[in-house]
Amino acid sequence: MTRRSQMAAGQAPRALQLIVKRHFETKHQKTFTDEAEKVESITCTVSRYEKQASTLQVFTAAKHHGTQVSFRIAHCIAKHGKPFTDGEFVKEAFLSNIPASARTVERRIQEMGDNVRAQQTAGLKEAQVFSVALDESVDINGVPRLAVMVRYCDVAVQEELFCLTPMPETTRGEDVANVFKECFDEQGIDITKISDGAPAMVGKHRGAVTMKLHCMIHQENLCAKMSNSDLHDVMATVAKVVNFIVKQSPFTHRQFQSLLEEMDSSCKDIPLHCAVRWLCCGKVLERFVDCFDVVKKFLAEKGQSQPELEDEKWVEKLFFLADITGHLNELILKLQGSGQTVLDMRDTWEAFIQKLAVFSSDIETSTFRYFKRLRELSAQRSISTTEIHRAQDTPLRCIFTCWTSLPDKFNCLKNIAQALLTVFGSTYLCEQIFSHMKSVLSASRCRLTAGHSETCVLLKVTKCDPQITQLANTKQGQGSH
């Protein structure tokens, strides 16, 4: 700064004072009678100004709080899988001055989804190792979607939905791997830190086959499918009968329900068999056996010939299959759930393997302590365990072989506590994601875009809280719209 500019800067306040003094003397000389009145007037003016400023601050704070409320309403809507238009209902019923239109709710949900993704990405980048579980399913619009769950150690072990992204036309193992890598590359996450994941589908030679550990629950179901052909024939017959009763026509189904009620059966209906549902087979068999006499009578009235239902050996296999699938369903339920480490699942598997020897001995001695339905059948007539023994031998060996064939690298992971905590043992959480997806992307909301539906599912299942206060601070407070 030059000397002249310094002199000018020093003279500026004095010049301003002179201007104010001249204005006061020329315009307000006669306004006040004495000095005390002038001081009182100035004090009142300052007080009035401070009150106006305080009112403006309250108004601004109210607008800011309204923005936070708007975010919380949108978060609640997404958390419960409700339509964006429900914000209008809340606005009309309770908070008429809060911005909660469908468009506003959509923007708020998208911003909170981006915030949660940023938190997840930061956690994954800081983690030394993390694990993934992935599975593929088709949404209501016929679009295949790849669900990727991640588990990593932060302050605690976190299990989060990383993406629910659409797949290309084909869903080969190579396509799964390409989409998988693209999702992580977009976020700048190093996939070399991935420990063994649990993919539900793998390519035989390319693609997701690089992730070695297969979902344990899917292994158990594959074991059941590889079991003795005699048991397959039993299940095929049961499925055929159930399809005739439930799926043939609504009238036939209602007649069967009426017959169950007339015969005072403990069952009200039989569920339709669905091969992709893990627990469905056991539940169908359980209900089929419980109303076995009613089923036979109903088929006879309808003129449907099923000679297998009169075959004693076939009936024995049916009752055995119902009991053993009940035990397998108990195993599946123990393997399901969040927060389970691979060691917990291994302990559950090994405990079940020990039970198999007990079950086999129970069949050999014909005590049927662990086979409730066979025990009830044995009270009515004698049972030959020869066929049952031959039928049960193959699946039990197969289940044991599947567990012992797991990679030896688990012995190394025992020494790496963090890696152990992050390893997925099953794709149960992915299956759960697809259930939420069907709830969010329902028939009445099928126009939702892939991005919106993914964000809604993310906010519905995530354990990360969106930073609403921080998001609200970036917004200018506005009134209702």
Image (cartoon, rainbow, N blue to C red):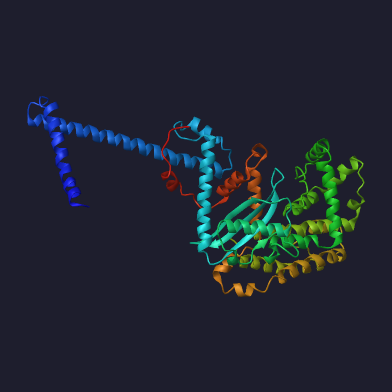
Q: Residue furthest left?
A: 34
Residue 78 vs 341, above or below: the answer is above
Q: Residue furthest top?
A: 30
Determine whether, in the image, residue 386 is placed left or right of residue 192. right
Q: Quadrant of residue 358?
A: bottom right
Determine whether, in the image, residue 462 is placed left or right of residue 22. right
x, y percentage for residue 257? Answer: 79, 39
Residue 381 vs 252, above or below: the answer is below
x, y percentage for residue 281? Answer: 76, 53
Front residue (pair 193, 422): 193
* Numbered disc total: 0
Q: Quadrant of residue 48?
A: top left
Is residue 294 at least partly visible in the picture?
no
Front residue (pair 11, 33): 11
Residue 15 vs 3, above or below: the answer is above
Is residue 177 at least partly visible in the picture?
yes
Front residue (pair 472, 153): 472
Residue occupying the point 10% across, 24% down:
30
Residue occupying the point 54% across, 36% down:
103
Front residue (pair 363, 123): 123
Residue occupying the point 87% across, 60% down:
230
x, y percentage for residue 251? Answer: 82, 35
Residue occupying the point 16% across, 48% down:
7
x, y percentage for residue 62? Answer: 38, 37
